[in-house]
Image (spheres, helix red, strand yellow):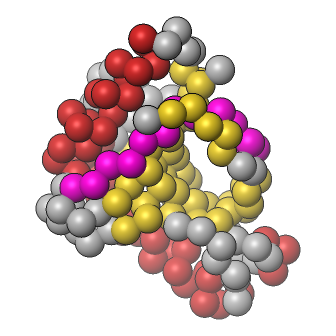
Amino acid sequence: MKVQKIEAFKAICAVNEATISTIPEKAEQANALIADAVARFGLQVVGPTVFQYTNMSQDMSIPFTLTIALPIANAEAYEGDLTIHTYEQISAVTSHYTGPIKDLSAKGYDPMMGYIKQNGLTMIDDCREVYHRWDGPDADTNDIELQIGVE
């Protein structure tokens, strides 16, 4: 776990309102739309899928904004209904989590929250999961980089 700079990037994005329970459905829909756009417009993928969570509260039943983003090099080639977004450079506490989704909070996010508190950092409203490997919700082989924006 460490604080590092997350470099700026451009991405094709699907933006949705979601709750924790609707993430799988929203992700499946968004990933299909993004894959179609990549194929149709010849977009050059330059990184793994990123899930960004904003306006999330401690109450997991309250809707928040879920943005599913795929970094691309040639954003100017896209002319569809999805969003092209430029992510600015941020500082973030980062950690890698490997395993099933059911343990992501306890084994991934909880230690990060402790680190943030112990080091007197202030969170910003930018939390990301970078999916380096996804083999399904129950897979022990999932590799997810967690990024919590801080200042």
Quarter of the figure that contains the C terminus: top right
- Judging depth in this view, the residue of 58 and 33 nearest the camera is 58
Image point 45% across, 77% down: which residue? 32
**Which span of residues is magenta-colored?**
87-99
Tell which residue pokes out farthest to the right in this image.
76
Image point 51% across, 75% down: which residue? 33
- Left or right: 80 in relation to 57: right
In the figure, 31 relative to 129: above or below? below
Image point 22% across, 55% down: which residue? 99
Residue 97, given in percent of the width and then of the height, sits at: 32, 49
The quarter holding residue 136 reads bottom left
Tell which residue pokes out farthest to the front in this image.
2
- Judging depth in this view, the residue of 92 and 65 nearest the camera is 92
- Left or right: 8 in relation to 123: right
In the figure, 143 relative to 20: above or below? below
Residue 112, given in percent of the width and then of the height, sits at: 38, 28
- Judging depth in this view, the residue of 23 and 117 nearest the camera is 117
Quarter of the figure that contains the N terminus: top left
In the figure, 59 relative to 28: above or below? above
| Main secondary structure found in the magenta portion | strand
Looking at the image, can residue 60 be seen? yes
The quarter holding residue 135 reads bottom left
Image point 25% across, 43% down: which residue? 104
In the figure, 132 relative to 125: above or below? below
**Would residue 101 be counted in the magenta stretch?**
no
